[in-house]
Image (cartoon, rainbow, N blue to C red):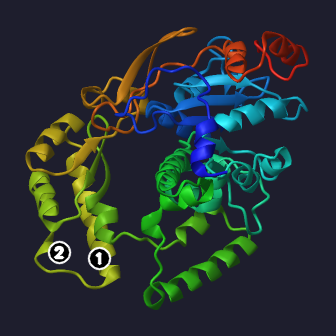
């Protein structure tokens, strides 16, 4: 079948208004087989760009619906990444589910999955199977560690991947001798979702040119590595011997059962002593904490002017690394003493006037009422049918002409089952039978 013929038989799943050419994913139908974060958030972003998204959920609902419910099947976690979609409960293992899936795929442009390793192939929803049957289909898949290698068959969540990838050891503050864990934001998941969005957009653009879809594969591990891109450079002539020595000493420390903190202390620093101790760090102030980032010499001098100190290394550079450590440790201590004499707001006024990049350390909750975020439309207020007024993050992408629009809340679980199945061509009697056989449901 030619691409043109395949396109001709495709039908939109639901009767929508005429296509809005200002929205990049208008007239694109997405079927989401996703749970937790990466795939659902990607699908939400596509919906905000105009895509029609149908989220397939197990009969008990996406697992995040059960995390501290605010109402029937509604939680902060679910609302945060499942807006702008229609949902269809479906028991994917039920023999009769295949007919429903087939009709969905006939109408789909994009399929998104994040099944555990092996399950997609077991269900016939893996990339090779789907693209062979539907050549124009774009299949986006998220896995923890990738399709090959010794860890390919392992399950993985954001916390596990942060540990495996180095993020946890490098960037989380220690607590009781171990890196922080459960309260860390799921950064790998969200970075992975953005990578998936880019991959889907790229595949759709290529399809416009070639008429064929294809697979988009992203992994949580790669997302976590991308977030640490600055650290993933090895210049063999300089870093090779250092890294080899650290790996040897690390193996010895582990063999001897040395505490994690001692193992962490063996890691080489990628920043210079000047950055670590003085110019690219957080200081305690009289009432809170302040981050400063002064990489250029001109900014460093501006910081010194604000705190009334002088860095002698600006006039007489220090070549020896050990001497640099001593100098900047002492300078950092002097800056700390001065910083403690004023409030964060007072320091901001002084540093802003000199063009020094600085910000007071805030808690996430404070950003929900932040003037800067509000002024730039980074937050979105919506009226949820179950829990009432809710403030969430707005769509993260701006495109002229309202290309992306913050999406409304998804309808209550199961409330669209009959409508969606009817639009797929199932009769009222067929729908009654599917519900009776527990292929699908209208309630949690």
- Tag 2 secondary structure: helix
Residue 249 disc label: none
Task: Give the residue number, with chain letter if any, for mark 1.
Answer: 324
Tally of marks: 2
Q: Is residue 300 above or below residue 49?
A: below
* Disc 2 + disc 1, Cβ < 8 Å: yes
Residue 313 disc label: 2
Task: Give coordinates of residue 295: x percent, y percent.
Answer: 23, 63
* Among the two numbered marks 2 and 1 on one chain, the one whose residue lies closer to the N terminus: 2
* Residue at 58 percent of width and 62 percent of height: 166
Q: Is residue 412 above or below residue 333?
A: above
Q: Is residue 391 visible?
A: yes
Residue 97: name its quadrant: top right
- Is 375 left, or right, of 52 in this rendering? left
Q: CA distance from mark 2 to mark 1?
A: 9 Å
Q: Quadrant of the C terminus?
A: top right
* Residue at 46 percent of width and 20 percent of height: 17
Query: Which of 438/308 is in front?
Result: 438
Task: Give coordinates of residue 132: x percent, y percent.
Answer: 73, 54
* Residue at 61 percent of width and 58 percent of height: 221
């Amino acid at each position: 079948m030619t691409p043109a013929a395949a396109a001709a038989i495709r039908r939109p799943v639901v009767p929508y208004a005429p296509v809005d050419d200002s929205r990049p994913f208008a007239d694109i139908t997405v079927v989401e087989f996703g749970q937790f974060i990466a795939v659902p958030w990607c699908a939400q972003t596509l919906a905000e760009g105009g895509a029609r998204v149908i989220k397939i959920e197990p009969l008990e609902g996406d697992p995040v619906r059960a995390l501290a419910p605010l109402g029937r099947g509604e939680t902060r976690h679910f609302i945060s990444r499942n807006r702008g979609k229609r949902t269809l409960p479906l028991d994917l293992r039920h023999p009769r589910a295949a007919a429903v899936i087939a009709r969905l795929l006939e109408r789909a442009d994009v399929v998104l999955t994040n099944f555990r390793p092996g399950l997609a192939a077991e269900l016939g929803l893996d990339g090779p199977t789907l693209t062979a049957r539907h050549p124009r289909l774009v299949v986006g898949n998220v896995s923890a560690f990738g399709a090959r290698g010794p860890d390919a068959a392992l399950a993985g969540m954001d916390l596990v991947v942060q540990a495996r990838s180095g993020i946890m050891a490098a960037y989380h503050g220690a607590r009781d001798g171990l890196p922080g864990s459960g309260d860390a934001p799921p950064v790998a998941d969200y970075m992975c979702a953005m990578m998936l969005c880019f991959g889907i957009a790229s595949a759709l653009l290529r399809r416009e040119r070639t008429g064929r879809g294809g697979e988009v594969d992203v992994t949580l591990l790669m997302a976590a590595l991308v977030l640490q891109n600055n650290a993933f450079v090895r210049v063999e002539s300089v870093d090779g011997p250092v890294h080899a020595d650290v790996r040897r000493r690390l193996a010895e420390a582990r063999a001897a059962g040395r505490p994690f903190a001692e193992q962490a202390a063996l890691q080489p620093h990628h920043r210079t002593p000047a950055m670590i101790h003085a110019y690219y760090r957080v200081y305690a102030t009289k009432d809170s904490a302040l981050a400063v980032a002064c990489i250029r010499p001109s900014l460093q001098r501006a910081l010194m002017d604000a705190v009334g100190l002088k860095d002698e290394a600006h006039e007489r550079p220090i070549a020896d690394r050990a001497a640099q450590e001593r100098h900047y440790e002492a300078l950092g201590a002097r800056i700390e003493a001065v910083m403690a004499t004023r409030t964060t707001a007072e320091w901001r006024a002084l540093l802003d006037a000199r063009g020094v990049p600085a910000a007071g350390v805030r808690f996430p909750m404070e950003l929900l009422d932040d003037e800067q975020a509000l002024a730039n439309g980074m937050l979105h207020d919506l009226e949820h049918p179950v829990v009432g007024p809710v403030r969430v993050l707005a769509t993260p992408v701006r495109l002229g002409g309202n290309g992306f629009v913050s999406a409304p809340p998804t309808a209550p679980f199961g409330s669209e089952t009959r409508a969606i199945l009817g639009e797929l061509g199932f009769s009222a009697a067929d729908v009654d039978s599917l519900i009776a056989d527990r292929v699908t449901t209208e309630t949690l």
